[in-house]
Amino acid sequence: MQCKDVELVLEQEGLEPLPDEARAHLAECRECRNYIADITSLVDAAKKLPPEIAPPDRIWISLRAQLEEEGIIRTPRDVIPVEPGSMWQSISAFFSNRVLATAMVGILIAAAAVFQIRSERTPRVEPPFKTAAVQPIVPPTEKPVTKPTATAPAVAQPSGEFDRTARDLNDQEPVATGMLLASTSPIDASLRDNLKKVNEFIAECEKHLKEQPQDELTREYLSAAYQQKAELLSAMIERGRSIN
Amino acid sequence: MCLRMMGITLARPEFYAKRGILPVLGAGLLLWSAAPARAAGTGQRIEKQFSVTGRPVVVIHNVANGRIEVKSWKNSEVNVIGTQSSNKIGFDIEQVGDRIDVTANVLDASAQPLELEADLQLTVPEETELQLKTETGLIYVEQVVGDMKLESYAGDVHLKEVSGYIIVKTTSGSLVCTQCAGKLDFSSIGGNAQILQPQLNNVNLMTTTGNVLFDGDFVRTGLYSMKSGKGLVEVRFSSTDSFDLKAQTATGIVDNQAAAFLKPDSHTARHIASKAIHGFVGTVGMGLAKVELSSYSGTIRIMKRD
């Protein structure tokens, strides 16, 4: 047996028991004896190591989240075992679900039809100003919306794609300014002054957009101005609540 | 007392005591009677110290009028000093783990503005996250590393040597940011923004009527967007900078005082899309950073520093 044969035996069969041929080779080969001694000492040292420490749960949670985020693993959906039931129960359940679904669809279609007919017959009535407590301020959207409606004379007249946003904000404006009307605080004066600035800027942008509808830069500024107006009105309402 | 400390003994101490106390008492009585009602609570001071283990989060909501000052030290402690002009304001200060909440509350709704002044002075670990909100009064932050959100209606915000993700929102207050690093978002209606000697790699500045000044280096691969609706947008760069520039205005003016340093843009994808917009694109150096300037009706000024 040669040295490489001993290595092969060690890889395949481990340290003990070594076959007789290997032992005979070791008796003659000093290098292989040293090699076996090294491996034996390594194994002994490994046996003396403390038992494996279990990592905390957060490591596993973090690892799982990372793997899921990278799409390497997926969280299996919870499967609720279905208890076997009688054939009659199954048929009944299937039929009742279908019936229920069909009935619901029918009701929805009927309701939609009634609503459509009524809306065609009755003229549309715009709701009055809503109170600040119930109406959220709508941030600027760039969706095409309905025709403009009457607004407070002091504020910008909306047109085009910002109609709905403008209308909502204009509805909020008298509420917000009304809440701070009696206040003489410099902050409230500053808020009112800034609202005026924003309104002027909005009016300027609106006017420019009517003349040059393709001006994307102005559209961006108009969108940002509506956003600022929404935030400003929110701040005014918040302050108004704290004062009153 | 000083004489005693110096080893000098008075021959008739009771005589000197009477002579010394009477004028002081008289003067005190006079000042007390002449002082306005505000003096009842003048100089009220509260100080608290909190130990923290990691990177603390400090949340301040100052509904009163006053200054908020935040500086850093090497200690793992947050020190809070609050001073108030009257007892019509109360401080709520509490610690929850590494979060410190400080709130100045108005206790008497009928209080006059002068009675609602409350200053806060904080000393925090160098790495601290901040969330400060005030109505008026200066917010001053110096040498703090960490994300911060600073909001004010009418007060200015001054930052010096801070870094992190910095968000500043004001209504009419202005921002002065000196030697700041990291990412900066500023939005305001009437406030100005001055960015001086920055090391910021991501900047978004937006003001409706205020002015914007950026005086400093553009970090390579940085992204910079500066907008003003009606104000001036001014950028001062150095010849060693490397950035692509896009400047555009709807009805304003572009004042390019550095035309000699701006090469035509070599990146074909970038151009002014609409003929209705005035402006230009150009490149300084290799064009590594990206700079976008715009103003609706104000002036955009581009200058090279000496």
Image (tube, coloured by chain):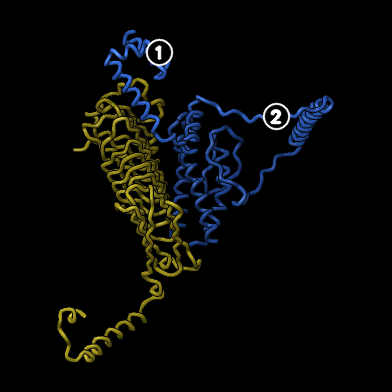
Chain colours: A blue, B yellow
First along the sequence among labels 2 and 1:
1
The one nearer the camera, B3 or B255, is: B3
Mark 1 nearby-residue class (10 Å; few <14, some 14–19, many ≥20): few
Q: How far apart are marks 2 and 1 (CA)?
A: 55 Å
Residue at the image point whose x is 34% and y is 44% from the top: B211
Chain hosting mark 1? A
Q: In which quarter of the image is the C terminus of chain A?
A: bottom right
Residue at the image point whose x is 25% and y is 90% from the top: B18
What percent of the width, then of the height, locates residue A21?
37, 10
Residue placed under numbered mark 2 in the picture: A81
- Asked which secondary structure carries label 1, the reply is loop
In this rendering, position of residue A109 left or right of residue B132: right
Q: In which quarter of the image is residue B17?
A: bottom left
Residue placed under numbered mark 1 in the picture: A19
Residue at the image point whose x is 19% and y is 91% from the top: B12
What percent of the width, then of the height, locates residue A137?
56, 45
Chain hosting mark 2? A
